[in-house]
Structure formats: structure tokens, C-alpha cells
């Protein structure tokens, strides 16, 4: 958890594969603790072909059934099938916008929102931006993209900086890494 916080969480992402990975992990996290997901991250990487959305978009019923027996991941049928659906929709968005990155960052006008949370109690669970993202993703056919999941994704992907102001990472993630 500490390594994830110190090196990844909140750092602006602009790589489509990494963005897809974070979307998948945040969807699987719904209703569970983040530590549960992080403990299985390598299992997810192996099971989902290192988050290769081109491969995942082609998964068939046989592959889905195999995933549902994989103890290295969360074996939730709705979340597994949503991952396949989301890979298909992800590719459609890429085709329309050139990259998924270009599409997803439009919800924050291309730059991170830097909140000034003094304590963890000040951190929100959603925002008008995550509401808009959720609505648009759902309209495009994505699954497990409610506003709270979208906001968690935005935090993880560095679209919103919710490191508390006393955290050493607050200033460290302000500058986007391309």
C-alpha cells in the first residue's frame, strides 16, 4: 500500500494501457478494500494478459469461464464480463478520439484538479467531473463506471490530486508526467 501511494497513486497517467489497467482495477474494487485488489494485482495482470485490451476484447465464453476459476483474481462474473465489455468499448473510444487518453482527460480539461484537502475527511467520493465521466461512459456502453468508481479512477490516474496538503506527494504529483 505504501509503495503504491508513494509511487503511483495520483500520478497523471497518459498511457492507454495503464489507464485501462487502472479502470479495470477500480471496477473490481467496487465493494471491496483497495488492499484486497493490490494483493491480487499480479494475478489480474496474468489473468488479463497484462491488461491488453485488444486481447481482452476478444475473450469468449470459454475464457470467461476460465477466469471465473482463477484464484488469483476476484471471481465475480459481472466484473469479469464487464472487463471484456469495457475493452471493446475502450477500443471504440480510441478509434473515435485517437487515444483513450485524449477522451478521458477532457473531463478535467486536460489537466489535474489539485484539491487542497487538509485531512482524509475532506476527500470527496465523487465530483461533477466524475458524474459527467460516469454518465458519458455509461452512454457508450461501459460497465462498473458509477460516479464513485470514476472518482476513484480519477484519483488513481492523477486526474485529481487528493493527496492531503501535509502529504509529501501533494506537491510531487502536481506536474503531469507524460
Image (spheres, rainbow, N blue to C red):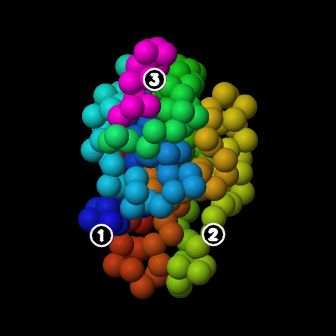
Going from N to C along the chain, the mark reached first, 2 or 1, is 1
53 left or right, relative to 26: left
Asked if the residue under mark 1 is in contact with the one under mark 3, i.e. CB atoms within 8 Å, the reply is no
Q: CA distance from mark 3 to mark 1?
A: 32 Å
> Which disc number belongs to residue 2?
1
Foreground residue among 34 and 126: 34
Q: Quadrant of residue 78?
A: top right
Pinpoint residue 80: horizontal percent, then vertical percent.
50, 32
Where does residue 65 sit, x and y in percent of width and height?
44, 23
Front residue of this view, candidates 90 and 51: 51
Residue named by callout 3: 64
Q: Nearer the viewer, mark 2 or mark 1?
A: 1
Q: Is residue 145 visible?
A: yes
For mark 2, give the secondary structure: loop
Residue drawn where x is 60% and y is 79% of the image: 122
Residue 151 pos. (x, y %):
59, 56
Q: Quadrant of the N terminus?
A: bottom left
Q: Nearer the viewer, residue 57 or 122?
A: 57
Asked if disc 2 and disc 1 are in contact, CB closer than 8 Å, the reply is no
Q: CA distance from mark 3 to mark 2?
A: 34 Å
Disc 3, SS: helix
Q: Which residue is mark 2?
A: 124
Position above or below: 27 against 67? below
Stretch of the chain drawn in magenta: 56-70
- Residue at image coords 45%, 52%: 157
Asked if 76 appears above or below 10 in the picture, the reply is above
Residue 11 at least partly seen: no
Amino acid at each position: 500500500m505504501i509503495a503504491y501511494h508513494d509511487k503511483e497513486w495520483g500520478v497523471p497517467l497518459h498511457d492507454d494501457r495503464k489507464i485501462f489497467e487502472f479502470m479495470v482495477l477500480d471496477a473490481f474494487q467496487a465493494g471491496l478494500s483497495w488492499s484486497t485488489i493490490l494483493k491480487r494485482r499480479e494475478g489480474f495482470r496474468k489473468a488479463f494478459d497484462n491488461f491488453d485490451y485488444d486481447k481482452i476484447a476478444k475473450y469468449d465464453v470459454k475464457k470467461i469461464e476460465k477466469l471465473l476459476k482463477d484464484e488469483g483474481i476476484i471471481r465475480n462474473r459481472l466484473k469479469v464480463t464487464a472487463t471484456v465489455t469495457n475493452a471493446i468499448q475502450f477500443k471504440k473510444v480510441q478509434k473515435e478520439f485517437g487515444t483513450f487518453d485524449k477522451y478521458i482527460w477532457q473531463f478535467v480539461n486536460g489537466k489535474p484538479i489539485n484539491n487542497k484537502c487538509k485531512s482524509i475527511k475532506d476527500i470527496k467520493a465523487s465530483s461533477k467531473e466524475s458524474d459527467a465521466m460516469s454518465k458519458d461512459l455509461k452512454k457508450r456502453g461501459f460497465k462498473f463506471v458509477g460516479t464513485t468508481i470514476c472518482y476513484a479512477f480519477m484519483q488513481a490516474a492523477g486526474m485529481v490530486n487528493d493527496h492531503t496538503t501535509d502529504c509529501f506527494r501533494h506537491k510531487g504529483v502536481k506536474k503531469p508526467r507524460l
